[in-house]
Amino acid sequence: MTAADGPDRTGRSDAIPVFLYHAVMDDPPDWIAEFTVTPRQFAAHLDAVVDSGRTPVTVSALADHLAGRAALPARPVLLTFDDGFADLPGPTAEALAGRHLAATAYLTTGALAPGGRSLLPPAPMMTLAQAAGLEGHGMEIGSHTVTHAQLDTLPAADLDRELRDSRAVLEDALGHPVRHLAYPHGYNSGRVRRRAAAAGYETATAVRHALSSERDEAHRIARLIVRRGHTLADVEAWLAGSGARIAPYRDGPRTVGWRWYRRARAVVRGPVFAG
């Protein structure tokens, strides 16, 4: 990592932390353990959010700001959850609701629907029927595709199907439009972003492990991926607007090279789990 690619350690008032969580459990499957926090860790993180004085908002609120429709509060923070693990509609949603914290959940429909097809390895998951209950806890719902494939390696028809079908399934379950997308493992490209916009998504979140900002790209919103090795001090630094780069910025050579390698591999192996 060069100095130009490294994190900005100085707190910035324009930084918007967008946290990315996966499972919140004590004994996760090995494949997701790196991206899992314990309930005790999660509670400490949420308490830090409350103590920071930041205002939790949904991705819709950020979308409205980026589109020029509405202003954000002075110090926003976003809490997002990918995939739809079994803890989400239970203790995780309850921990958020108990602190009156808004959040957004991106669901992988193929892993939640009966008989669905997904590339996610086995894990305890919520069901599609529980999605409406998440909204009852004040959580916004977005799409995380059908199978959790690496979108930037898919042929056009397969890419469009992932975007279209996942949204249709969620809209049928919820009875209202679904406006937002999260790219599995953050993998995206200019082509993917254009197809996401064409499919009707107002925003799409990536990963980038960076702080977002009021100037971020609507279809490549930066998120901070929370890993089990991150400390409470890391969370507090991000809430202070430091400890990571601030988007928007261009992809570096390593990101571009890794994308081309994965595309070549997908030609031989077919769709691959994004993880």
Image: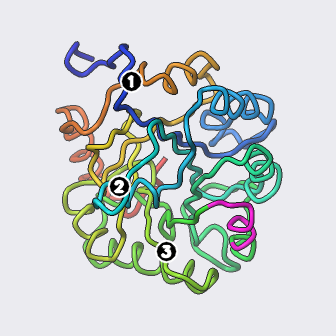
In front: 15, or 186? 15
Give the mark, 2 or 1, whose residue is nearer the N terminus: 2
Give the mark, 3 or 2, whose residue is nearer the N terminus: 2
- Residue 124 seen in the figure: yes
In front: 239, or 41? 239
Residue located 25% across and 46% down the image: 259
Residue located 33% across and 63% down the image: 69
Tag 2, which secondary structure? Answer: helix
Q: On the image, numbered disc 3 is attached to which residue?
A: 178
**Where residue 65 is drawn, which disc sits there?**
2
What kind of residue is marked 1? Answer: Ala
What kind of residue is marked 3? Answer: Val
* Magenta span: 132-139
Q: Position of residue 262 (x, y in %)?
A: 30, 49
Marks 3/2: CA–CA distance: 18 Å
Q: Is residue 133 magenta?
A: yes
What kind of residue is marked 2? Answer: His
Picture quarter containing residue 261? top left
User: Does residue 121 appear left or right of residue 275 in this picture?
Assistant: right
Residue located 43% across and 63% down the image: 181
User: Does residue 117 appear left or right of residue 207 in this picture?
Assistant: right
Q: On the image, numbered disc 1 is attached to which residue?
A: 244
Marks 2/1: CA–CA distance: 22 Å
Q: Position of residue 171 (x, y in %)?
A: 55, 82
Q: Position of residue 225 (x, y in %)?
A: 50, 36
**Where residue 96 is drawn, which disc sits there?**
none
In front: 98, or 204? 98
- Residues at marks 3 and 2 touching, judged by CB atoms closer than 8 Å: no
Residue located 79% across and 36% down the image: 39
